[in-house]
Amino acid sequence: MFKSLLTGAALGLSALTMALPAHAEYPERSIQAVIPWGAGGATDNVMRSLTPYVEKELGGKFILNNRPGGTAVIGSTHVMQQRPNGYTILLGAENPQLYKVLKLADFDYADFYPVNIIGQNVVVIAANADAPFNNMAELMAAAKANPDTLRMGSTGAGGLPSTVSAMINAVDELKVREVTFGGDGPGITALMGKHIDFMPLSLAAARELVRSGKLKALAVFATEETPELPGVEPITKALPAIAEYLPWGPFWGAFVHKDTPDDVKQKLVDAYAKAVGNDEFQGFLKNFGAQSLNLNGAEAEEFLKRWQSVTTWSMYKAKAIEISPDSVGIAKP
């Protein structure tokens, strides 16, 4: 009888198991995608353009949320604090790689898993269309004639403008007032409204506005002209010594918590790789003035380490930061 009871129990358990729904395939619900910058900026535009292709490849829906503030610390921290299940993803830029040396936070992208390093961009020094200066040399002269008077748009310590400003001040003197915004989108609006005088921006964010005459490009942050903005001089024409920090540029990437399950990571990696490689999105990047990277795995990690090393040690040499990068585990390039 005891054997009969065991057999009956086993059959009942087997029937119950068969009745239970199979484990749902990821993603079984919407994915919260955090953009740690304001709407309308370069990061926001890139991510909103890419996401429909990712959704198609992944077979899931992304809910895009802008969480600006603290040079992307607020949005990045939010993603770190969520369950590592792949349902919260960070769509960010380069800024976390500078947090430790700027004392903004005690983490960087080593605390995330890089799903994809999407692309990289050139920097352009942009002014409002009616600015009295037409190139970088004239801007430098105006700043020296009236120190701490010109208003430079910024996105906070560790943002693109402040990093570029630090590199400029490493080789010359650019004393200006920094006006901080929650992203380059609000900064561009202020620039066009003449509430600020100039702002270092990604080419992706500024290109069409420069082409349409709504903004004026003073220089590209490079050693030679870029084909996307013909006739705009490289910054080395006015500041030859800055060449030691070049080439340099911002980048964009998709990241999840490093403890996310491996199978989920792989699905995201595969979807993003195909989405970034999509011909239509590649055309978008080209028109945006950006270079496609489409890196994941070891290549993405190597890119992140090199960018962090080159940038932080350049800033340290420029005395833009007090903390030696090696004190927080960043090796020399």
Image (tube, rainbow, N blue to C red):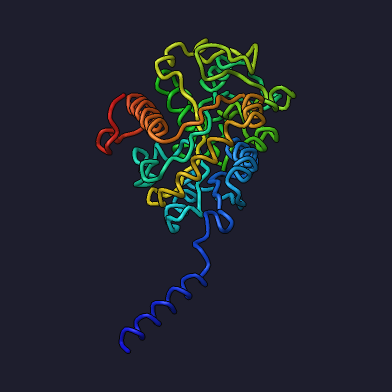
The quarter of the rendered structure image containing the N terminus is bottom left
With 294 as the anchor, is 317 left or right in this view? Answer: left
Query: Eyeballing the image, is 281 above or below 217?
Result: below
Work out whether residue 148 can be spotted. no
Query: Eyeballing the image, is 20 above or below 199?
Result: below
Give me the residue at 56% from left, 58% from top: 28
Work out whether residue 174 can be spotted. yes
Q: Which residue reaches farthest left?
A: 327
Horizontal and vertical percent position of residue 49: 65, 38
For residue 216, what is the image quadrant?
top right
Give me the residue at 55% from left, 27% from top: 292
Give me the residue at 34% from left, 82% from top: 6
Horizontal and vertical percent position of residue 333: 31, 24
**Which of these two is toward me, 179 or 23?**
23
Query: Eyeballing the image, is 118 above or below 56?
Result: above
Number of numbered discs on residues: 0
With 119 as the anchor, is 41 left or right in this view? Answer: right
Q: Which residue reaches farthest right?
A: 212
Horizontal and vertical percent position of residue 17: 46, 71
Horizontal and vertical percent position of residue 27: 54, 54
For residue 327, what is the image quadrant?
top left
For residue 96, what is the image quadrant?
top left
**Which of these two is toward me, 88 or 162?**
88
